[in-house]
Amino acid sequence: MIPLTYNVRSLLVRKTTTVATALGIGLVVFVLASAFMLGTGITKTMVGAGRGDNAIVLRKGSDTEMASSLEVKTLGLIGAAPGVKRSDAGGALLSGEVVLVIAQDKLGTDGQISNVLVRGVPETAMQVRPEVHVFAGHAPRSGTDEVIIGKGLRGKYAGMDLGGSFDLKKNRPVHVVGIFESGGSSFESEVWCDVDTARSSFGRDGLVSSVTVRLDSPTKFDAFKATMESDKRLGLEALTETGYYEKQSSGTALFIKIMGGVIVFFLSGGAMIGALITMLAAVSQRQREVGTLRALGFSRFSILTSFLLESAVLSLAGGLLGIACAFCMSFVKLSMMNFATWQEVTFSFDPNPAVLVGSLVFGGLMGILGGFYPAVRAASVSPIEAMRD
Amino acid sequence: MGLVTIAVRNIWRNKLRTALTLSAVTVLVIFFLLLRTVIWSWTASAEQASQDRIGTRHKVSFIMQLPARYVEEMRSIPGITKVAHASWFGAKDPNHTDDFFSTIAVEPKPFLEVYDEIKVPKDQVEAWAQDRQGALVGDVLAKKRGWKIGQKIVLQGTIYPGDWEFHISGIYTADSPTVDRSTLWFQYKYLDESRPPRLQDQVGWIMARIDNPGRAAEIAKAVDKKFEDRDIQTLSMSERALQASFLGMVSAILRLIDIVSIVMVLIMGLILGNTIAMGVRERTHEYGVLRAIGFLPKHIVIFILSEGLFLGMLGGVIGLAIGYPFVQKGMGPAMEENLGAFFAFFRVTPELVVISFLLAAGLGLVAAIIPARTASKLEVVSALRRVG
Amino acid sequence: MSEAEKGASKGTMISLEKVRKSFQRGREQLDVLAGLDLKIEEGSFEALMGPSGSGKSTLLNLIAGLDQPTSGKVIIGGADVGAMNEGQRANWRASNIGFVFQTYNLMPVLTAVENVELPLLLAKLPAAERRKRAEIALRAVGLEDRGGHLPSQLSGGQEQRVTIARAIVTDPKIIVADEPTGDLDRHSADEILKLLEKLNTEFGKTIVMVTHDPAAAERAKTVHRLDKGVLAN
């Protein structure tokens, strides 16, 4: 086997060409990793809001909480269904919520309006969603105009900070008494207020948008779903919370992944050709060298693998740079519209190790594919070349 | 024969390398066309949205409805010439539940007066106005679903549950990029009469034509002022402002795409620069001979820059020759049909064609600058010493 | 009037006086030529010979105006070439010197006649005139029927002949040749040397040739031997 140092030294000798090609591949790896980091970041944010042992009940046919509307009297029915966990006090762990999207002036833009999701919640909400945790201030008291906001909203809209206030609608000011976080999920882009405040502000008397219940365990979901959907008159539909959020985010996440895929398809095509050009030139320049190696007794196969390794080293070097930069993207936060709910959600680039490693491998593959034909050319050089002029 | 013609011929010295470089440039040019058209397609709707129409919605949330009587009241506001209302319905085709398209309830004639980019034959308009369950369907949607005039279809409501039957009264088309040709417009009275009393006499939003586009912001403010003290307030803005605010919400994606465009330009530049530099290095002795004969460093620079420029230009031309039909005739209609909600109009603008060509040519030129300077600075004697 | 300038008016074409050429190699200064004097008459055919590193190529470069001496005078055809800057020397070379190098003289993408036309591009002659002169030059070297061929379609000897045609197309006074026969077989080499002789005797060109080839040296009228930067005779 030809030692790897031969390849590394050869690469270093043609510094400019090596750097140019490695950079090209690095750029593609960067884009690939970033796109998929965003895709998984979106899924993580959206799906992170859901629990496997929570179920959400909507009106049949509605895709989102916002389009759904249930009468308050169904709450009792839902709470009595099999599988619903009971709290220590004996009541059902159930949260009937009023969900709306309202227009708010975005700070730092020229009067640009953006959509913020407002969730009117009962006291049981925090029990049903224990991952929601108020870290500054305190939880709102029921029946008041106190609200808490997710940390993703902080400072983005007028009045949305601890101690601030803004209008839910005209003459309906609310006061921000707390900020909550929920492990990076989409809840962090929501405003939570008292459910009755929401009802009366938005004319939803006697109604809720959705009902979220905690089940004894994820296995109880099927029975629960069957009960919910058995009475056709009620027109209910039940999903696991994770299932619901997966549906919500799939559109956006898929969109990003497809776009990322298309982008990488084209860019990698270009970068691979770049690697091909570089390795071809290297091979033709080193004809005599290769001829000498053959004359010395190295087999065609060892030459082939040697040049393939050289391409791999070249592209992995670029790829490493690419994922290093992609990793830096994980500190960037993106505010984007969730196409399913029309609300603006803060997403981040998830530094998923699988994505990073996968992108690096892809980079290496790019180099090997691009360098394959040149490696074959090198392997077919005969020892006589060593003696030529 | 001149330096430039020799430079152009030099491009074919290493046929394989040139072919590879050109194919890389071609791939990237096609990609550039695709990318910029995606952005254009999104932003065109904002830029070309009319200034002579304003939209009025519930101030608090676009989910909430306005009282129907507001429509009449708006007619009296100075500057407003025509008014029509629309209400979002939200429905799915039970046979294709994953395919999204818009369903909106309107009053046929007032709606078409305000929204006159929509082109429908007069007889179809009449048929629609006469039929309570009539629907006007966009030509892209009709083609996709195979719907014909006179056909009866059933859709499932998402906000108003149940099965809703519609009769296809007409198929519309439009030549403005702002119009979504995949929408189903139906009769407001069909929706209003079918919903519970407490939800009746409400509309989703109100559109109005104004006499002076320059006064759009003013008139919008006047509308909001009129309803300021009511229980339900309004938020009005020109259609262009509305579209711009939608774009604002996806601005992050647009910025990301811009970054990708820059990455692409960098990659193209690296490949072109690399190829040119390699060629220059291999021809050092030749440049030495030219200098010996009496050519000056500046001639060598012109030589190399011309080569880079022509390489870029050639790549640009080939890329456009393949890319333009691909995006315009191939992808365009496919995008409009399948992703019509996002890309109502997916076309390559003439400006983009020119920009793409200039980009490729310019990159070829710029990429040749450093190799040209290095070559010209070399002493004649050193250049002659290099062999091959 | 210095000796050199007096010599120039008497038919001396090339005059080097106390010429030194040093190169900087890191910290060391290498003196390749150390105070050399040389006179070459108009119409001479001189060969420069010597072992590797003797400085013969350096000397040739100075004579050809390709390089500047570190000190001393280089007067060629009455012009103080040694004192010119690079731009001036380039212009001077264009009309005064014809070049024949050992290999890779011709541009592969140009035909024989186009290669010969190259120096005329600098003279800014119209295309028809350039073509005419190039063809005349090609006829002088016996390749008038090969004008449309690319260098890849010519033999080594033919390539060198085209090179010579290019060297004379501007009608320069001096032809400088650096190992013109180095890459050729015996037969082609003889052809080239015969051609150079003809240029010298029939057309009165002054020829200065660096060579290793004893046969080439024989054709020359005078042979200078260089060793460590010093002329032997």
Image (cartoon, coloured by chain):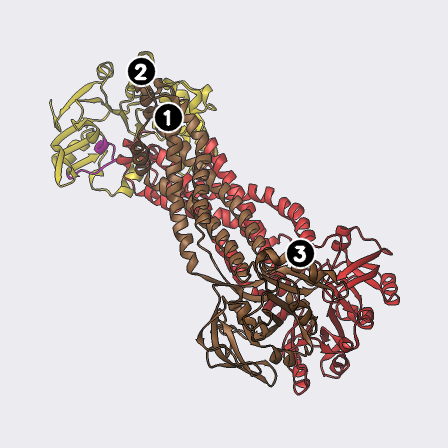
Chain colours: A brown, B red, C yellow
Q: Which label lies toward us, 1 or 2?
A: 1
Quadrant in the rendering for residue A93? bottom right
Q: For this rendering, which residue is in front, B16 or C117?
A: B16
Residue B343 seen in this snapshot: no
Circle on res. C189: 2
In the image, residue B103 lies at what x, y percent? 74, 63
Report whether mark 3 lies on the same chain as mark 1: no
Picture residue at 17% right of the left edge, 22% below the top: C50
Circle on res. B345: 3
Report whether mark 1 lies on the same chain as mark 2: no
Amino acid on which the number 2 mark rests in the picture: Ala
Picture residue at 68% right of the left edge, 79% below the top: A203
In the image, residue A220 lies at what x, y percent? 61, 58
Amino acid on which the number 3 mark rests in the picture: Phe
Mark 3, chain letter? B
Q: CA distance from mark 3 to mark 1?
A: 53 Å
